[in-house]
Amino acid sequence: MATYYQEPSRTFSEYLLLPNLTTKDCVPDHIDLTTPLVRYRRGEAASLSIKLPFASAIMQAVSDDRMAIALATHGGIAFLYASQPFNRQADMVRKVKDVNPTQPLVVGAGINSRDYAERVPALVEAGVDILCIDSSEGYNEWQRETIEFIRNRYGNSVKVGAGNVVGREGFLYLAAAGADFVKVGIGGGSMCITRETKGIGRGQASALIDVAAARDEYYDATDTYIPICSDGGIAQDHHIVFALGMGANFVMMGRYFARFDESPTQKVRLGDQWVKEYWGEGSNRARNWQRYHEGGASRLEFEEGIDCYIPSTGPLAKNLQTTVSKIKSTMCNCGAKSISELQEKARFTLVSQLTYLEGDAHDVILKHELPTADGVRDAG
Ligand code: IMP
């Protein structure tokens, strides 16, 4: 008989954080967002960490060398897209690593479970800091084999994340396989239609809460801490704090970064607004069949992502600053000066539909919705 979970799966928008006591030393300037990227033993420090818990998605529309340089300069990390010839991807790694020898920048790269025997050596030789197996669903033997190949060839010197999973079984499988971090999330991406097409997935908050609990139990049992990354579905800046509070060590975002001038896609005028192109790796446009590899045909038989536009929002630096200010402000309200403190202290409440509505502007006349003198609605 099938297994039935009685609780519906939840997403970030169904939660709110309750404030804790803010002590006088808990101010934005004192908040440290440094976070580990790779597994480590209790009492030791991770061999690779980042100052800003943001990773840009392994997508053609998001992570090329230009984005990697911009994001790493601000303390985050890009994972260069894998759906390109490995020599070209390795060239991108070199461009990031060569830029500024005085300030070494970290860079990651996506790989797949098909051509790793050629791709991994090329990326390692180019100086990549960390790899990540890019797959829409990662609880499978191909991922274990890919990690095995890396461990046999390089021992623990080459770092590799795996995923994506949405529950404890998937996490424990990839942890045992030797993944340095595990990525969480299926079907929550902004341009994703995986849930519609295939009927698999789980609300992002529930997936994360379940995996984080498994990670903590694994740490208690083995003294090995494995970072987790919340991937996809960040629709509001505060969702980032929720993800961190629910146990993620960092978040991976596609839409968020694709909006910026530094993303690889075209900026287009659409009516009276500027937009950027954005498309899923599972769309016909990306033709990234390796990401959806299930051992069968080497082609994309149906789409799991769409090709769309998103509003263009200017340069990365300015937007990042606003987002980080919001995150730090929320953390101050929660009385947390670090991500690990937030994870210990965060108190989440589920919201009713009415509470949700109460949180929006209500019972007021919105100026930008007023008709103009000629009767035409102002687009704001
Ligand atoms: P976003 O930040 O909500 O835009 O989601 C980005 C994430 O969506 C990526 O990091 C991937 O995990 C996932 N993704 C990328 N391309 C596709 C696709 O074509 N279909 C489904 N999910 C995708």
Image (cartoon, rainbow, N blue to C red):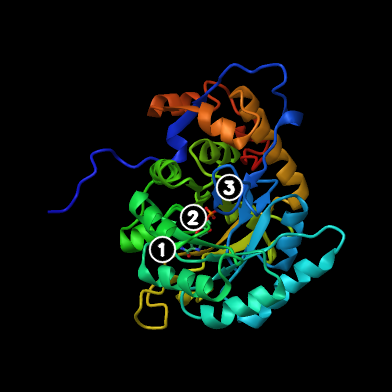
Q: Which mark is residue 183?
A: 2
- Give coordinates of residue 327: x percent, y percent: 64, 35
- Distance, label 2 to label 3, CA atoms, is 10 Å
- Distance, label 1 to label 2, CA atoms, is 9 Å
Q: Is residue 362 above or below residue 110?
A: above
Question: Which of pointers 1 and 2 lies earlier in the amino acid sequence?
Answer: 1
Q: Residue at x 70, y 36 (%)?
A: 32
- Quarter in which the C terminus is drawn: top right
Label 3 Cα neighbours within 10 Å, binned few <14 / some 14-19 / many ≥20: many
Amino acid under disc 2: Lys
The secondary structure type at the circle numbered 3 is: strand
Q: Residue at x 76, y 52 (%)?
A: 315
Q: Which mark is residue 138?
A: 1
Q: Is residue 18 above or below residue 140?
A: above
Amino acid under disc 3: Phe
In the image, the residue with mark 2 has its CB under 8 Å from the nearest atom of ligand 1: yes
Label 1 Cα neighbours within 10 Å, binned few <14 / some 14-19 / many ≥20: many
The secondary structure type at the circle numbered 2 is: strand
What residue is shown with label 3?
250
- Give coordinates of residue 359: x percent, y percent: 51, 26
Amino acid under disc 1: Gly
